[in-house]
Image (cartoon, rainbow, N blue to C red):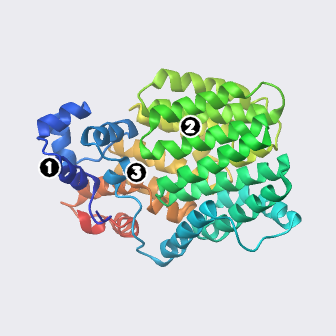
Amino acid sequence: MGDVENTGARIRQYRRARGLSLDQAAGLAGISKGYLSRLERGERSVDSRARLTSIAQALEVSVADLTGQPYAPREQKHADAHRGVQATRLALLDPEGPGRSEEEVAAIIDGLDQIMARCDLVDEARIVPNVLRWTQQLADETGSPEAHRRVAIAAYTAIFYARNMGEFDLAWMAAERLRSAAEASNDPATLGLAAYGQAHALTPSGALRRAASVAQSGFDASDLGESESLAARGSCLLVGAATNASLGNIDTARAQLDDAMSLAARVEEPTMVARHTSFSSWNVIMHRVAVEVESGNPAAALETARPLASRPVKQRERMSYLWVDMGRAFSRMDRHRDAIDAFRRAERSAPLRVRLSPVVRDGVRDLLNQSHRRVAGAELRGLAERCGVLGEV
């Protein structure tokens, strides 16, 4: 199915292909028949990851089948970013090719966190395949723990590039490279980073319970000693909280965030794990916002977000997530103008990532549905066009 169809249309098509009635599918997914009918007609969007996962499981399809990911390129930047997908796959399957010196590779790896913070997927498409090959070549040659840690950082970056491109199987391939490198490094902090990366590779495919288990294992394996291990432990708490919220375990998620905030106060910057995962007190706050949105408490989410919205942090990628969550919260409160503004702020922070986000696409589609009987404003129509959903409503 192409990305010109919306999630509801895909749900309807898969339901009919499975020979299920609305009553049967709704019962299997644990939702009402009326809600499912409105989803299929495009009158509502799926408002939580847990609900989307339950619908996918009921229809025996993947979450990506319902969201339509990966999306076909519609613009030059998307096409440029997409060029790295096959190159990344080949680099993971076959790292042979021209290499670089250890000094050159070390310098590139040292700057990968800044590339991720900018969330420029075109830059990542150009860099990620090369660093995957170069780091693996050096690790095979030297076998040193430091060389394996560099492999881990390269693979970690590849996970998030692949996730943002909607290439979830590729993200898992990178997660397996990360796990293998972390084990070879025999470094507790890198093992914690691997658990964090693996959990993030699992969640967009709907493997939420396994993601929560992996995050917990990373937390359990990290000690309470030096800052690097504390950051790994805290990062696993963050992804665990996000995953538990998607599973509906809101109290568990909130407790994990409380523990993460305590750890954040003890981490001395900068550490390798904290740089790459952005583990910090402000990132804990961002996760609180996401958990409250997932729990159906938009007012609490917006109140929690207030300090960061008024004084943004430098990481553009993280700010894009915050503004998306705020847009979702505003939408749930029928504050449509504020929702449009929040989604546009998210787009300015990380343009291509946001346009490729199914959460944003569904949110923008909802806003169009609610305004199309009137005249949708130019800002909303422009955002819908850039996200590829203008012609669907």
Q: Is residue 281 visible?
A: yes
Image coordinates of residue 382 in percent, x first then y, are 38, 69
Q: Say whether residue 338 is left or right of residue 185.
A: left
Callout 3, which amino acid?
Val
Q: Quadrant of residue 102?
A: bottom right
How far apart, in angstroms, are the residues tagged by discs 1 and 2? 37 Å
Q: Is residue 278 above or below residue 85?
A: above
Residue at the spot x=12%, y=35% of the render? 23
Q: Say whether residue 165 is left or right of residue 194.
A: left
Dot 2 lies on which element?
A: helix
Q: Residues within 10 Å of mark 2 (few under 14, many from 20)?
A: many
Residue at the spot x=60%, y=34% of the render? 238
User: The C terminus appears in which quarter of the rendering?
Assistant: bottom left
Reading the image, the residue beneath label 1 is: 16
Reading the image, the residue beneath label 2 is: 287
Q: Of the residues under marks 3 and 1, which one precedes in the sequence?
A: 1
Callout 2, which amino acid?
His
Q: Is residue 297 above or below residue 157?
A: above
